[in-house]
Image (cartoon, helix red, strand yellow):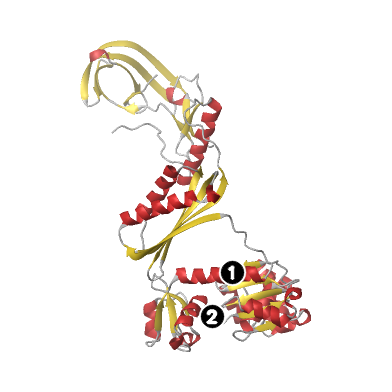
Amino acid sequence: MVGALVISRFPLACELAERTDLAGRPAVVARGDGTVWTSSPAAELFGVGPDQPLREAISRCPELAVLEGRPAVYRAQEEAIRGALEFTAFAVEEGLEGVWFVELGGLIGCYGSQEAMASAILDCAPAGLSPRLGMAPGKFPALVAARRAPAGRFLDVEAGRVETFLAAQAVDVLPVPEEMIRRLRLLGIETLGALAALRRSALAAQFGPSGAHAWELAHGDDDSPVRPLQRPERVVEDIGFEAPLASREALQVAAEQALGRVLRDTRMAGRAVRQAVLRAETERGAVWERTVTFKEALVERDRLWTALRTVLVEAQLPGPVSRLELELTGLVAAQGRQLALPVGRRRLREQLEEALRHLKARYGYCPVGRVVEVEPWSRIPEQRLALIDFDP
Amino acid sequence: MSSSPGAAGSRAKRLRPLNQPSAVGVKVNDGVPSEVLWRGTWRRCSRVEEVWRVEDGWWRPRPIRRTYFRLALEESLVLTLYLDHLDGRWWTQKY
C-alpha cells in the first residue's frame, strides 16, 4: 500500500495559513516575473489560472488579492513536512509541489490501526495547510484518492475497488501531456472508465507511450515503488543579518566568513568539496541561488573562495539580503596534491587532456588542435601538415 | 589583409591545412621579382637565390602550377614567393 499526502496549491496554502481573512476569496500567489504561480478556486471561477500574466489576471478579476510569492518560506515548509514524514514512515518520496508518497507496508503494525497511522501522517503537515491523505495499492490511485479526500482527512481505496474508484474520475487526473487530455476530450473520452474500456493497442497507436501508460493507470496498474530521496552528505552554514545587506562588498565579507566557518566544521576534516551552493534570501522571502561545481575536489580555502567570489561578483540579487547560506556537498576524501615536484610526461599529458575536456564541455568543441602529418613528402607545402581538432 | 587560396573557415571542417600561402604585392622586372611589399614597405630584391617550378595534381579540378622564388631582400631578409600561373597572383609561403 502507498499513501499520498497532498496539499493542494501549496504556495497558496502556505500564504492562506497566515492570511485567514482571504479564505474563500479570489487570490493568487505571484512569481517574481509577474505571472501567476497558483490561484484559489474562487479566482479560477473568473478565468484566472497559473502562468497567466498578473495584468491579465487582475483585469479578469478586479477584486483579486495578489500575494507575493516567498519561495524560501515554501521550501522551508516543504522540508519541515518531509522531515516529519521521514520520522513517521519508513520510506518517503517527494513528488510534485505539495505531494509526498509514503510506503505504508508494515506501517500499520507500528501504529495499531489504519486510523492512527493516517492521523500520524496527516499530523506531519500543519492543519492550516489542509493536508489530505489517499491510500491505495499504487502511487497513482493513492494520489487521486488524496485529491478526492476531504481536507484534513484520508480516503482509503482498497485493492479490489481501485478500478471502480478510478472509473468515475475525469481524465484530467492523468499525468500525461495537456494536449493528450484535450484530444481525449475531443474524442468524447471524459472519464478513466471510458478510457479503460478502450483497447491498449488503440491508445498506444493514437498517443504513443503516453497512451499505453494512461491505459495502465486507468486500470489502476501502477507498481512504481516509493523511492526514498537519497540525500547526499552536506555541510551548511548560514548567516542572518539584522539589517539586510545591500552592499555587494559586505555580502562578500559575509560569504567569506561563512566559508571559513563551514571549513572549520568537524565533518570537513580531511574532506574535499566537489560542489558548493550559495543561497541568498531577501526580507520578503525571494531567493537567489547558484550552484558552483568545481573542476576537481577542492580543499584549499583560497581556491574555494576564488570560485565563490566570482559568482557573488556577477550575482543579480533580487534585493537586500537578509540571510546568506553556504552549502558544501559532494564531500570526498581529500587527496594530497603534488604541486612543486617535477611531473612526468604521462602525468602532464593527463593534466592536458583533463583541461581540454573542460574546454570542450564549455565551448561545445575543443578549441585546441593537434598538428598531424598528412603528406610530409609532398612538394606542395600546404599539403604536408594539417591541424586536427584535439579530441580528448 | 591577406587571403589564402582555398582557405576554409568553418569549424565543421576538422582537418585544416597548415602553412597556407598569403597574398603578397610584387613588382616584376623581366619575369623576376624586383620589389616585394613586405609588412607595409616595398623592399628591393637584392638577389634571387633559387627558382623552381612545381606542377602537380593535373588530374584534379584545381591543379597546381607554380613558380617558386627564394629571394634575398634588403636587410638580410630571405623570403620564398611563388607565382600562381592559374590566377597570375603572387603568394608568400614557407617552403
Does residue B45 appear in the picture of this structure? no
Location of residue A176 by image quarter? bottom right
Q: Nearer the viewer, residue A264 or A381?
A: A264
Does residue A78 appear in the picture of this structure? yes
Report the side of B90 relative to A274 (left or right). Answer: left
Disc 2 element? helix
Position in image of residue A127 (x %, y %): 56, 82
Image quarter in which the N terminus of chain A is found: bottom right
Disc 1 element? helix
Q: Which residue is mark 2?
A: A129
**Dot 2, how many residues are within 10 Å of its Cα: few (below 14), some (14-19), or many (20+)?**
many
> Looking at the image, is A72 positioned above or below residue A131?
above
Dot 1 or dot 2, earlier in sequence: 1
**Which residue in the rendered view is the most extreme toward the right?**
A160
Q: What kind of residue is marked 1?
A: Arg
Q: What kind of residue is marked 2?
A: Leu
Position in image of residue A211 (x %, y %): 66, 71
Give the CA separation, mark 1 to mark 2: 14 Å
Q: What chain does badge 2 belong to?
A: A
| Residue at x 32% of width, y 56% of height | A250
Image quarter in which the C terminus of chain A is found: top right
Q: Which mark is residue A82?
A: 1
Q: Nearer the viewer, residue A360 or A383?
A: A360
> Looking at the image, is A314 positioned above or below residue A367?
below
| Residue at x 65% of width, y 75% of height | A4
Report the side of B25 relative to A119 (left or right). Answer: left
Q: Are marks 1 and 2 in contact (CB under 8 Å)?
A: no
Location of residue A108 by image quarter? bottom right
Q: What chain does badge 1 belong to?
A: A
| Residue at x 52% of width, y 76% of height | A10
